[in-house]
Image (cartoon, coloured by chain):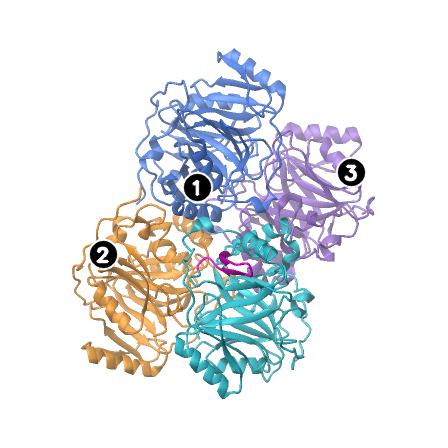
Chain colours: A purple, B cyan, C orange, D blue
């Protein structure tokens, strides 16, 4: 497994979605069809990292990861069979062979080894716009059983960088897991799950995020601004959380760090530590804690470990 | 009248105040005596723009303005006599002759023409620290009668840049008034008054404010962070509101504009317009609307125009 | 005199000029006619601060200043007559009565009290583009006799903030003069004059200037980048110097300071001090020292004080 | 091989070196002994990434890389034996077993699997100072035979991200090679070699680099500023090159990108392309092209491929 590669969800009004993702946020529109938008960040050389397809339900179809080589897909299918997970190969535009399966909690995952190459826009400063999003960074999902989600992903090679312990026995309340060498490719938080919480898009500077706030708030997109800007303790992220026209949540995100060392010691956070969530900034709104995007055809479960109330530090 | 020049208040523990203003915020400590701290911003060439004197009550003694010449002090004294305001000349360290009086609402004002000169630190980048505060920018006070406050200050030459109308007859709920050519030297907001709301300190960049958030929140000063960062509609300020150890409120502030044109048309805001207060960012906490520093020996009055509830935009 | 208000010059290809000033630099295009472009910065409420009119010679027609009131124009005309300078009233689109005259060195000056009002775009973050220029800040001209230029402008009320002394007797080699309360509205440097050196446009942040470098260098405008980015000692400016398609020079500029105090002591620089010109950054190219825009119909003169060679600090 | 981990060089005056690296640049001083300084960036959890040891010759002793596990050291020793490179195990403070050898061109390399753990300062914003250096990013060396350097490093698992072709047959003039997933851990440029060109230290923002320029230039360190700030085409780096008191070169560096994809296509640059070196900014000084730090006991060779003259774009 190389890295998180895309999110693929439904949008009820593609024109409206395009005005948000492309005109306001400034993502690069690789391709637009009658039924779908294929988007990417400025530095990305793969055809898409966000796919929005026309649909009646604004759900999230799949989370895509890139693997090293074609054979990894067969190895992964074999692994699924071994642990009793059904799998299938699906067709995805601009991608090579794509394996689809659901993790033990029902999370829909797609794996691929090759995707159509497109030019990096990193040095095309003339096309920089909006939030100047550089690349997809991670996804964050609600899980009803974070320990089970963790076990599955660690088993296939993910590594932990930070986690929240619900008690002294380190019962997992949330976990940040990576492959690509920074804080995370995927994270899980205890909650009604599986549900999609957000896709994190990496931007290079605090000033780009503040300017995005100014632009969104004065061009009709104020309702899209759900939380922030602020600083998380976990991941050290300087963040802004947005909701797209269908409620899909996006985190604009910067200030992470390198985690490639094999002897990297994960950071443990106490669930009750207020700076875990919010080093500074107002507490998150209720919607941020409770709302998420459904995955189609997956029943959600109540979390095994209930969230304890966040005590605001002031 | 040239400009706002200083605030002079009491602090109950000067060492604690120094750790906040100098060590955390990075103001330049021009002089420290057993009884007082004299502080200034990096570019300032006058001895002090913030004076904190040891006292049992954390009140605000006076707001100081610089006038053009010595004779202006006598003209101001004469004007006070004319409109029935008692006045006196007082001694202030490092200042020339200083006229003290209270405005018709009881606001304690001091005027001076000369202050000891000290070097600008603007080009001494090695001493830049904390929020890299450049200079005092303005004060903001609660007034029980904004129209009366406005009339007094406009009468002595202040000019309006922005104001909030409480109704269609433009009853003044708040007003931003300047002498030095940007948005304000002093502003008044309707409330239990006269009370001091905050002193605005100008910083040159958004990144300095965000870094200040990170520093304060991780060095024990999280409780000092009252509101923000965020963007005001009024004044276009990118702001962070802090409370010093005695509760004196400071606004770190950037993004203003030039207002020297004599035909400058003030901007009118509706009291109910949510973007007047907050273009984006969480609504201000109750303390920000209600708490202020007392001026010693001045009875406060209920506001003539009650504040209407701020309707948060989301 | 309120402030510098506009530069008015000729352009040989308006479409090309527009692609530079509007598409690349992001100035607001207030009005476009068959013969002229009227441009302004984001915060500006006057119709134009840069006028480019179609012409065969890329010269600079006039430098415009705003005065307080209509009567000031008559007072200025009277002053001109008194000191033997011919004057005339001219028609300028979107302006009220406009007085035109040449200063004793031949510098073409226009004065006006009123200009058509247009909306400030300061809070319209959706239209921010390019360098996000906020407003005109100053002009800088070569003068063959800086002392004479200085005397004329100080006589009509300009105030000095910084100057370069050619010798121990303080023979003026350059001078920075203001009305609006920051470092300058106009500056003069010793050289073949009178010629226009540059118009300074104020931007709010270092990051906007660096992004402009990236954009210009990758969209075909690399040849427009003449000097910088860097830091001047004089004025503390963080700067980038550009040449428009006709060679008119623009300084993108930030980091100035407040100068409204009547007892402000001008900063004296030694001509030989290398940090006067360049705190850091490469020495300026020859073109920056030697090239300027002609004013039509004005013979240029050799400077009374020759420039001494700039000794690069490394 | 995990990543570049440290540079270890000699300094002739440790107190002077400390004033540069710690007081001016703000690196974290992990440990100071009578003979050595052990430095690291704010986020680093390993004991050191820069070691300066007292010596009479300001040479560079070794370049250190971290490997995944102890057994990798034995595998590396075996590999060295196989290709005829002598190796030895050496003692290094705060490190586990350390393998030392020279690559085929004489470059002194050290490998280790474990180093003493120290706390990350990433969230200790109160200690941020100077350039706010986050971590070591890469080293860049002159090689007399870039193809041979390239072959050795690619053979042990490094991957190419960008390179300069000296001709149409892609004769290698320079190459950027990585392990950790961004542009490089090590790069080679054709020149009198082997010599050390610079160590790249990652900073998170353009504003930190500009502030470092202001600080260095006004605190006596102007002579340390060799080149920049500017933008490289290669690597997209926003850079500033410094020389420490012994001439060891440092690049402060930001704006890189993610390179973990196995199908990542390296970027080819023409040697004559002026934007390869300098997207914008002045051409590099001669010293930057010619000067480098010697490795002790290694004879330098003339480059097989001579550098072609850089044609400045203006």
Query: Mark 1, mark 3: which one is toward the viewer?
Result: 3
In the image, residue C238 lies in the stretch drawn in magenta: no
Question: In this picture, is C139 found above or below C80?
Answer: above
Q: Main secondary structure of the magenta part?
A: strand
Q: Pointers 2 and 1 in contact (CB under 8 A)?
A: no
Q: Which residue is mark 3?
A: A170
Q: Secondary structure at mark 3?
A: loop
Q: Report whether D312 appears left or right of B211.
A: left
Instruction: Check the image and report above or below for D10 versus A99.
Output: above
Residue under the image location 70 percent in, 55 percent down: A284
Q: What secondary structure is marked by label 1?
A: strand
Q: Position of residue D235 (x, y in %)?
A: 46, 38
Magenta extent = B28-43
* Mark 2 in CB contact with mark 3 (< 8 angstroms): no
Location of mark 2 (residue): C168
- Compared to residue C222, the image places residue C185 above or below, namely below
Q: Is residue D259 visible?
A: yes
Q: Is residue A13 visible?
A: no
Q: Chain of mark 3?
A: A
Disc 2/disc 3 C-alpha distance (Å) = 75 Å
From mark 1 to mark 3, how far is it between C-alphas? 43 Å
Q: Residues within 10 Å of mark 2 (few under 14, many from 20)?
A: few
Residue that mark 1 sits on: D239
Q: Residues within 10 Å of mark 1 (few under 14, many from 20)?
A: many
């Amino acid at each position: 497994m190389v890295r998180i590669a895309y999110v693929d969800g439904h949008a009820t009004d593609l024109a409206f979605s395009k005005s948000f993702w492309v005109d306001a946020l400034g993502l690069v529109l690789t391709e637009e069809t009658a039924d779908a938008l294929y988007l990417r960040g400025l530095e990305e050389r793969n055809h898409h990292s966000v796919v929005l397809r026309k649909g009646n339900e604004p759900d999230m179809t799949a989370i895509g990861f890139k693997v090293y080589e074609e054979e990894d897909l067969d190895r992964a299918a074999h692994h699924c069979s071994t642990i009793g997970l059904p799998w299938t190969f699906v067709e995805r535009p601009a991608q090579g062979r794509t394996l689809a399966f659901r993790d033990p909690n029902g999370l829909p995952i797609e794996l691929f080894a090759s995707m159509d190459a497109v030019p990096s826009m990193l040095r095309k400063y003339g096309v920089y716009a909006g939030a100047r999003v550089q690349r997809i960074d991670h996804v964050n999902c609600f899980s009803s059983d974070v320990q089970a989600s963790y076990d599955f992903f660690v088993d296939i090679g993910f590594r932990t960088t930070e986690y929240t312990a619900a008690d002294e026995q380190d019962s997992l309340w949330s976990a940040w897991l990576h492959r690509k060498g920074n804080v995370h490719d995927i994270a899980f938080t205890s909650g009604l799950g599986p549900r999609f919480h957000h896709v994190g898009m990496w931007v290079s500077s605090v000033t780009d995020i503040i300017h995005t706030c100014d632009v969104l708030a004065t061009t009709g997109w104020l309702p899209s601004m759900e939380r922030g800007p602020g600083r998380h303790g976990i991941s050290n992220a300087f963040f802004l959380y947005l909701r797209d026209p269908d409620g899909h949540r996006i985190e604009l995100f910067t200030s992470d760090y390198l985690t490639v060392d094999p002897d990297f010691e994960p950071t443990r956070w106490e669930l009750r530590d207020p700076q875990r969530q919010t080093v500074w900034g107002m507490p998150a709104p209720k919607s941020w804690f409770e709302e998420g995007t459904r995955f189609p055809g997956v029943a959600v479960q109540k979390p095994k470990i209930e969230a304890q109330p966040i005590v605001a530090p002031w």
